[in-house]
Image (cartoon, rainbow, N blue to C red):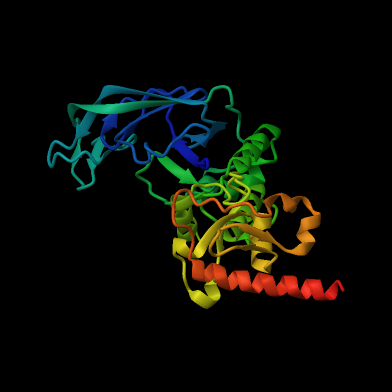
Amino acid sequence: MTSPRAWSFLTIEGTRQYGGNAGYDDNPAEVYRYDSNVANYRQVAIKDVVILRSRTNILGIAQIESIVPGNGKKARLRCPTCRISNIKERATMAPRWACKNRHLFDVPLQESVEVKTFEAHYGKTFRQAPAMLTLQQINDAVVRPSDQMSIKELDLAKLEAILISEAGCRQLVENFAGAISLDTSAHLTAEATMPNSIIEARRRVLREVNLRRGQPQFRQRLIQRYGSACQISRCDYPYLVEAAHIAPYALSNENGAHNGLLLRSDLHILFDLGMLAIHPVEMTISLHTDLMKMEYAAFQGQRLFLNGTTGPDRTALEARWEFSKRLDAIAATNSK
């Protein structure tokens, strides 16, 4: 699962110029056009939230509904002196153009270049942004600030308190938060700064779930070895399947696949408590006496799923097995 991102789209009604490319025709309330010469063009995706802005105003907020790719040609503008494309038009100064190397000129050189083109459509979800939202607040929410980028990634959590003041914008924020996935690379901010943020709350919960599921590299080794489902219940819901150490990591310092199992969260707890054990030779499940009175009894004697491999380390399983059998003996003594 991929988490949505949030973006600031710089647009100018009519046409705009960026990095020496001229002629991006926009209708800011419906579509945003960009091409493969624009930074971040690969990262923008359907369901991402975008805030449309000009140099002086915030035009609105929307969620991308579709992206239409294509091919085309763009007019690349260059400095006539040093021929670099890093040039800017100066609306109120003469000469009208300047390049990064500080050459000034009235007319840039123009060439035609092949580019991949993209149209991000969002007309059905477009709405006006809250009046209190400012350009400075958007700039403060930029993840990697750069004045040379017309598509900038935002940490939407930093704008959430303002956005949720409008019902339509609040729905976008809630949709965004609900779509954040377990394996997100979203930018986490200090929770103390936004205690009521639903985006941060979602991130925090998923971060905690990830910790419970196990270290990412360890978990991935187990998935590559056994598949993504629990090796006992065959549950494959990613929020519930965790990476379990056989020999505790604190004692063994071992994160190899041979020292792990993929277990449903409740079975992971029972395994750690010694109430569920795996026979080190037969690879069958053995349950504590108390569990035989519950629905877990269905797993008694079931063979551990090994996915055609030799399975986990048998020496580590044997230590767990002996611990579990001692617990069973204690329970039997206490019941007399």
Q: 294 or 7, which is in the foreground? A: 294
Residue 309 at x, y percent in the picture: 44, 53
Q: Quadrant of residue 132?
A: top right
- Residue 127 is left or right of residue 34, and the answer is right
Q: How many marks?
A: 0
Figure check: 241 above or below 87 = below
Residue 7 at x, y percent in the picture: 48, 40
Residue 201 at x, y percent in the picture: 66, 52
Figure check: 242 above or below 68 = below
Whether residue 101 is visible here, answered yes or no, is yes
**Which residue corresponds to the image point at 26% horizontal and 28% vertical from the top-left?**
115
Whether residue 143 is visible here, answered yes or no, is no
Residue 208 at x, y percent in the picture: 62, 58
- Residue 314 is left or right of residue 290, and the answer is left
Q: Quadrant of residue 174?
A: top right
Locate the C terminus and report the quarter of the image it occupies.
bottom right
Q: 307 or 80, which is in the foreground? A: 307
Kindly give the residue lying farthest to the left in the view shown: 81
**Which residue corresponds to the image point at 58% horizontal and 60% vertical from the top-left?**
211
- Residue 8 is left or right of residue 329, and the answer is left
**Which residue corresponds to the image point at 55% horizontal and 31% vertical from the top-left?**
63
